Image (spheres, coloured by chain):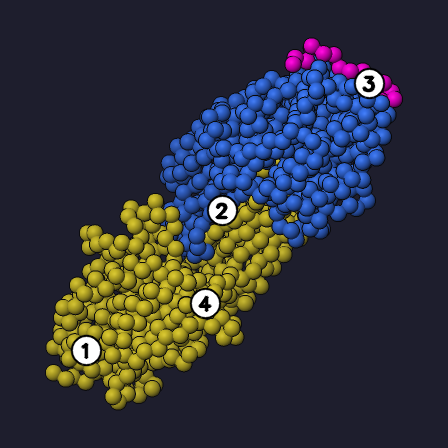
Chain colours: A yellow, B blue
Amino acid sequence: MSETATPATVLTDAQRQRILDAVDAAFDDQIAFTQELVRHPSVRTNEQSAQDLIFGALEQRGLEMDRWQLDPEDLAEHPGAGYVEVSYDGVDNVVGTYRPASEDGRSLILNGHIDVVPEGPEDQWSRSPWDAAIIDGWLHGRGAGDMKSGLVANLFALDAVRAAGLTPTGRIHLQSVVEEECTGNGSLSALMRGYTADAVLIPEPEEDMLVRANVGVIWFRVRVSGQPTHPREMSHGFNAIDAAYHVVGRLRELEERWNAEKTKHRYFEDLDHPINLNVGKINGGDWGSSVPAWCEVDLRIALYPGVTAEDAWQEITAELAKITEDDGGHAIEAVATRTGFFAQGYVLEEGSSAEEALRESHRAAFGGAELGSFTTPGYLDGRVFVQYADIPTLVYGPVSEAIHGNDERVDIESIRRITKSIALFIAEWCGVDDEV
Amino acid sequence: MSETATPATVLTDAQRQRILDAVDAAFDDQIAFTQELVRHPSVRTNEQSAQDLIFGALEQRGLEMDRWQLDPEDLAEHPGAGYVEVSYDGVDNVVGTYRPASEDGRSLILNGHIDVVPEGPEDQWSRSPWDAAIIDGWLHGRGAGDMKSGLVANLFALDAVRAAGLTPTGRIHLQSVVEEECTGNGSLSALMRGYTADAVLIPEPEEDMLVRANVGVIWFRVRVSGQPTHPREMSHGFNAIDAAYHVVGRLRELEERWNAEKTKHRYFEDLDHPINLNVGKINGGDWGSSVPAWCEVDLRIALYPGVTAEDAWQEITAELAKITEDDGGHAIEAVATRTGFFAQGYVLEEGSSAEEALRESHRAAFGGAELGSFTTPGYLDGRVFVQYADIPTLVYGPVSEAIHGNDERVDIESIRRITKSIALFIAEWCGVDDEV
């Protein structure tokens, strides 16, 4: 259904208030359920038990259920798929569909990811990353912000609309996807399965703001080969760990060249440093007393919207080839392979009715405050829907701290306001029949 | 038995020739046996099958056999023990003792290590590291030079003396020890078990030369802690992998300060770079898109004889503490732990009768050439016997290439000459009864 076919419902003030009250009424349950979800350590390939919990919660609400395992071969056909280095055994997407009796309203995908990044050394945390403690109005834990609170907000927002006696008249897909933190293959797989809609909303932790633009991301591994020897003959050897650092230095020059081009990219002009090269993992050498023969570095680099992953990849591999060329004597060999994300960034074009509807909902939920928008130098699954299905996609969610870091946490009152905003948006976007 | 009690036997030219001929007669068998031994990949904790082979070969020769598993707790009592990070289950030393009817001659330990360093990436080798191929007069393979050819040379040298109809009149311990490449605990355990003698000979691959002095070695791991974040907030994070490189840079300054002191250390004045800091292994980070929270670097550093491991360790840890101090803002935390060697270097004092006897043997085996001596910037088990039992220890062995590297190999004719020299040394040092 095209978004021009049905104008947004204009809710009455009373209807709005019923929705807001319904969010408040269920909010303790919502936070308790979020805590339960945070306690499932759904790091990559370990999402199963968390997806079971979500599946049960959606099914219990009478939604039409779908659950499927991701298929690396199917995905590999798609240009936007990330490279898969793990087994997808038991790595499932879950979708619950709300289907109105008569589909008069606009359809909506409420998307969120279930996977979380690894917690890292637990002794660097103030408490267990998995105990989901509430302290001074913050919910703590790995994934609390990124993005289990948002995923659960989707569910409770829809609950609130219905609890308010309003029946959405548009189709709604509640998606709990995997692989957002490494490939983006979860949302891509949902799209390839046929799920589309007139708008998508993804409550990533975005500080109560709407994402206007973001970067694409490529994950890759550089393997550097050295010339091992006994340390007694060290000057004849060639240390692959040192060489890896040299290679990273050269890639940082590429990073700076890309950052210098920010003025050419709309919405990125004012960012300090939009393109970040992250050295995420390193592993090299076999023996303390052998000059190491090899070193592998896992890197993540960003790219501007409009730059294809393929073009960025060409530049990266050309830079690596040049390192070998420039290094006549030692003949550093640095070989790059893709290890995950191979994704272009996206821009949410201004002026969509979806954004207009969200602005309205935001004002109502945030006491009249205008919805801000910003550009983020991180990856978002939004690119899947914008780029491959041309769907306006609203990435918008609560206030968090230290996502991907130690002591990740999310602001509970921010979750409340965001949930209210999403609930109002659902009603306004999809339209509602009032049963009261 | 003190070495002054019995002067070295002076062999007749005919006796010498019988010994040299006996080495030649068995040399094909010796090389075949060395090949068989090289085919056992006796990397650390995997020495069992190679020790079985040695045990069988010693037992077959009627030696008095001893085999025992190393005990980390016993070892930990000794100041020269290396720190043990592995299980010693099945990690055995093997000793075969030749005991003459009447012990009139000087006693001798013929020591060699069975452990080899890891082969590294096999695709960097021209052929399998374990096929023990002979090409153009070189025996190839991991451990071929360091030091299975020497270990087997000890055995066949004693064979040759006996095959020549000569019966040594001194006690001889043939030791096949583990752990030379990481802790030195194998030789130390043999000493702690009570094995001593009037001289020790260790045929490490030393280019047909005698080691006059060598360095001590410490193995340690530095764990650097960072401040993980999402790459979108990279400037707030603190990358532990970058920090680890910074720490290594600071330790390289320490290395250079130590190298600058070489003029104060007898036998090290003329070496270009006696103190080598090797970055042997690195491992850090959990996730491509998280600024890494930790990085561990495994390092090996050398120390001059006369500098205790304890003193060197104090300097290393003080340097690390200073890094944290100097880095007020980021507060790098770099913590060092011992991971293996904690060993002082040694000097073979000039003028021992053992060295005199070897000079004589060397001349006879190498066509009149004088025995050269040199200082090596590598670890040697010789330190165990020199330092803790005051035994003159002759580290002296064949010509090799690329020990600890790719395509390690040992010169076969060099093995022949060294075996001849060892055989003559056994006879001259221990004394012989001539049964012909």
| Kind of residue sitting beneath label 4 | Tyr
Q: Position of residue B416 (x, y in %)?
A: 80, 33
Q: Do the residues bearing badges 4 and 3 touch, measured as CB atoms within 8 Å?
A: no
Residue shown at the point (85%, 26%) measured from the top left = B18
Q: Which residues are magenta?
A: B1-15
Q: Nearer the viewer, mark 4 or mark 3?
A: 3
Comes first in the chain, label 4 or label 1: 4
Name the residue that disc number 1 marks: A162
Gap in angstroms between the C-alphas marked 2 and 3:
57 Å
Gap in angstroms between the C-alphas marked 2 and 4:
26 Å
Q: How many marks?
A: 4
Q: Quadrant of the N terminus of chain B?
A: top right
Q: In the rendered structure, the residue with mark 1 lies on which chain? A: A
Q: In the rendered structure, the residue with mark 4 lies on which chain? A: A
Query: Foreground residue, A421 or A435?
Result: A435
Name the residue that disc number 4 marks: A88
For mark 4, does the 10 Å Cα neighbourhood hold few (<14), some (14 to 19), or many (20 or more) residues?
A: some
The main secondary structure of the magenta stretch is loop
Q: Quadrant of the C terminus of chain B?
A: top right
Q: Nearer the viewer, mark 2 or mark 4?
A: 4
Gap in angstroms between the C-alphas marked 2 and 1:
52 Å
Gap in angstroms between the C-alphas marked 4 and 1:
35 Å
Name the residue that disc number 3 marks: B11
What is the number of the mark on residue B283? 2
| Kind of residue sitting beneath label 1 | Arg
Q: Nearer the viewer, mark 4 or mark 1?
A: 4
